[in-house]
Image (cartoon, helix red, strand yellow):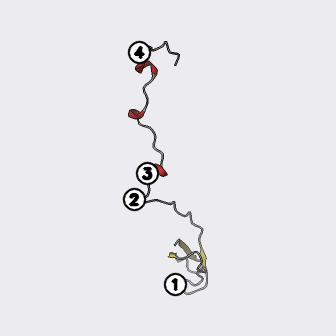
Amino acid sequence: MPTYDYECSGCGHIFDVLQSMTEPKLIKCPACQKNKLHRLIGTGSGVIFKGTGFYETDYKKKSPSKSDAKPSCASACPNAGKCGS
């Protein structure tokens, strides 16, 4: 269930509520009891997969380290400079 932020235009009270997406918007401020609540637009949150069924490689790219890099032809090939690569 998402968390929605609300602000009262009457008293300025700001709070958040855990609500289902199908529930109607709140209209009554819990602080001043006026019907002047407005739902604020939020940035949302990213999805984080946790647990044993997910792997780090499923959603995250690693930059190769120097130890993973392949050696160049010049240092690994006995025919360095003669093979054309």
* Outermost residue toward the bottom in this view: 33
In the rendered image, residue 6, in percent from the top left (x then y), is placed at 56, 75
**Disc on the earlier residue, 3 or 1:** 1
Label 4, residues with CA under 10 Å away: few <14, some 14-19, many ≥20: few
Answer whether labels 4 and 3 touch (C-beta < 8 Å): no
Q: Which mark is residue 52?
A: 2
Q: CA distance from mark 4 to mark 3?
A: 38 Å
Q: What secondary structure is found at the residue carrying circle 3?
A: helix
Residue kind at label 1, given as amino acid type: Pro
Q: Residue at x 58, y 86 (%)?
A: 34
Residue underneath mark 3: 56
**Disc on the earlier residue, 2 or 1:** 1
Q: Is residue 60 above or below residue 8?
A: above
Front in this rendered view, residue 37 or 72: 72
Q: CA distance from mark 4 to mark 1?
A: 79 Å
Residue underneath mark 4: 78
Between disc 3 and disc 1, the foreground one is: 3
Image quadrant in which you'd find residue 7: bottom right
Q: What secondary structure is found at the residue carrying circle 1?
A: loop
Q: Is residue 56 above or below residue 34?
A: above
Answer whether labels 4 and 1 touch (C-beta < 8 Å): no
Residue kind at label 3, given as amino acid type: Glu
Q: CA distance from mark 2 to mark 4?
A: 46 Å
Residue underneath mark 1: 30
**Disc on the earlier residue, 4 or 3:** 3
In the rendered image, residue 79, in percent from the top left (x then y), is placed at 44, 13
